[in-house]
């Protein structure tokens, strides 16, 4: 049974990356903190648990990564080229992929605090490493990192969450499992005076003057997905936790918070067609995703291509292309590769739990995957004829594209002509939703009259206004811990007034 007191300085709703960052920050600022985890302890951690752990933040050179990685020998340095990723590049990428819609003030806070907050996480016990297998290619004996991403949390999402929970426990922060926030309690001024919890023993009220909402979006709520994202989204597979059902957004809206952001938009990916419909698999975590598509072709079951696989680095297209699969017949697509790139496919292609077929001919592949065989042969033949004979380099936007076909393939266009051919069946897996609550740069939730609600803060995936249409890969975790730390600090300071 959950045990907790009847009064706290700060109550944090949620127990993922954003929530635990908030709880730790509030505690370090002197507040007594309670964390509410809707899931049972065995399923704790929210979406953060099943993430791959890639984290986007700016850096000028390898020396900027040393506070995270620890010292690196000269021999190892000689084999690493992380390039640079200045703040201006992060900001520009965020604005580019969101069509300029990201809130510029929140974007500034995200970009300018990302690196230092990542270092703060290291101080809280989170371990970091370089993403050799997922974010670099070996070129002339040197690992070339690309796409503005170089670092990941050791142990992926599980490692991140377990480290944060360890720190939370060490600090003496109370955690109530299988307990959710049900509704917020406000005083005559409209400020927070408490929160009602729903747990194994029913409803309980906690007295508090500060609440941080960090319990995710509504991606695991089929009704809300259909209401906001549109028809068909109730059939998408939920790749993360099944407990993110929009509770924090609902609670805040009920007391007059302002809705904000892209409610009809979400982060979605190419997700193995045979994966569970809801809740993913905590052992496999994010390995049901399939993100090496820039190295091959994507077709639907009618044998037709429908996106430019090489439009940009996968970091900037996968969250957009995932939802395009939902628009295809039977909500299915096939990623096709030949033997030229097999050794370059990411780790997730090599797990046992994949829906795939291999053949020595394109027709045989089509038959094995129940694709229109004549159409697929035509598509591949047309594509091969359109490929330009220019140099190929998967570590850069190499411009090796096609001419005269629609859609084009703008980069990394190799002819698909070296058997065996392997096809991976994928569908749409939803990660998190983009619409949520309006906050200011200090994490305070804003009401419908554009005033902050006293004592109410928010962070993570239920904050709206940062991501629209798409997002730069690895920035979701960053968004969580940056605004989580800010919200936790603000909540503790408010409680001390």
Image (cartoon, rainbow, N blue to C red):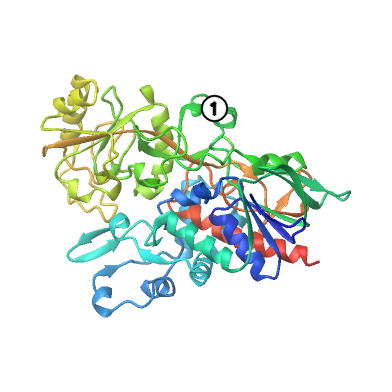
User: Quadrant of the rendered structure where residue 377 is?
Assistant: top left
Report the side of 372 relative to 360 (left or right): right
Residue at 59% x, 41% y is 435
Visible residue check, residue 289? no
User: Quadrant of the rendered structure where residue 434 is?
Assistant: top right
Callout count: 1
- 484 or 231: nearer the viewer: 484
Q: Residues within 10 Å of mark 1 (few under 14, many from 20)?
A: few
Residue 195 lies, in percent from the top left, at: 75, 48
Is 168 above or below relative to 189?
Answer: below
Residue at 29% x, 31% y is 406
The residue that disc 1 covers is 230
The extreme right residue here reads 188
Dot 1: what SS?
Answer: loop
Residue 280 lies, in percent from the top left, at: 43, 40
Residue 384 lies, in percent from the top left, at: 16, 35
Rendered-image quadrant of the C terminus = bottom right
Visible residue check, residue 287? yes
The extreme front residue here reads 1
Residue at 50% x, 29% y is 233
- 99 or 156: nearer the viewer: 156
Residue 453 lies, in percent from the top left, at: 77, 51
Report the side of 303 relative to 3 (left or right): left
């Amino acid at each position: 049974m959950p045990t907790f007191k009847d009064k706290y300085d700060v109550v944090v709703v949620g127990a993922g990356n954003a929530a635990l960052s908030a709880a730790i920050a509030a505690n370090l600022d002197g507040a007594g903190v309670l964390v509410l985890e809707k899931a049972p302890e065995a399923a704790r951690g929210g979406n953060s648990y099943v993430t791959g752990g890639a984290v986007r933040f700016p850096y000028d050179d390898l020396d900027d990564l040393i506070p995270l990685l620890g010292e690196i020998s000269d021999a190892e340095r000689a084999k690493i080229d992380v390039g640079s990723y200045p703040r201006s590049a992060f900001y520009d990428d965020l604005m580019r992929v969101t069509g300029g819609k990201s809130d510029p003030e929140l974007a500034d806070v995200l970009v300018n605090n990302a690196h230092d907050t990542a270092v703060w996480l290291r101080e809280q016990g989170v371990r970091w490493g370089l993403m050799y297998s997922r974010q670099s290619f070996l070129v002339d004996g040197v690992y070339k990192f690309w796409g503005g991403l170089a670092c990941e949390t050791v142990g992926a999402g599980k490692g991140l969450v377990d480290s944060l929970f360890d720190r939370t426990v060490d600090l003496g922060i109370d955690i109530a499992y299988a307990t959710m926030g049900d509704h917020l309690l406000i005083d005559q001024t409209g400020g927070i005076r408490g929160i009602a919890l729903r747990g194994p023993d029913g409803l309980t009220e906690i007295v508090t003057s500060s609440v941080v909402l960090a319990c995710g979006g509504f991606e695991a709520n089929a009704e809300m997905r259909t209401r906001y994202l549109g028809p068909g989204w109730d059939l998408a597979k939920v790749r993360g936790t099944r407990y993110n059902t929009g509770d924090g957004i609902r609670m805040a809206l009920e007391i007059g918070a302002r809705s904000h952001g892209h409610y009809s938009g979400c982060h979605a990916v190419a997700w193995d067609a045979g994966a569970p419909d809801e809740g993913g698999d905590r052992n496999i975590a994010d390995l049901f995703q399939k993100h090496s598509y820039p190295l091959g072709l994507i077709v639907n079951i009618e044998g037709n291509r429908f996106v430019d696989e090489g439009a940009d680095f996968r970091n900037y297209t996968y969250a957009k292309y995932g939802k395009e699969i939902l628009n295809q017949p039977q909500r299915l697509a096939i990623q096709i590769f030949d033997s030229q790139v097999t050794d370059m496919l990411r780790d997730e292609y090599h797990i046992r739990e994949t829906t795939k077929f291999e053949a020595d001919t394109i027709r045989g592949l089509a038959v094995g995957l129940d694709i229109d065989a004549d159409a697929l042969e035509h598509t591949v033949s047309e594509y091969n004829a359109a490929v330009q004979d220019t140099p190929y380099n998967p570590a850069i936007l190499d411009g090796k594209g096609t001419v005269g076909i629609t859609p084009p393939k703008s980069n990394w266009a190799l002819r698909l002509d070296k058997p065996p051919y392997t096809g991976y069946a994928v569908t749409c897996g939803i990660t998190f939703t983009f619409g949520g609550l309006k906050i200011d740069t200090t994490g305070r939730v804003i009401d419908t009259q554009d005033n902050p609600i006293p004592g109410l803060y928010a962070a993570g995936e239920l904050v709206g206004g940062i991501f629209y249409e798409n997002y730069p890969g690895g920035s979701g975790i960053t968004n969580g811990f940056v605004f989580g730390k800010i919200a936790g600090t603000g909540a503790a300071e408010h409680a001390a007034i």
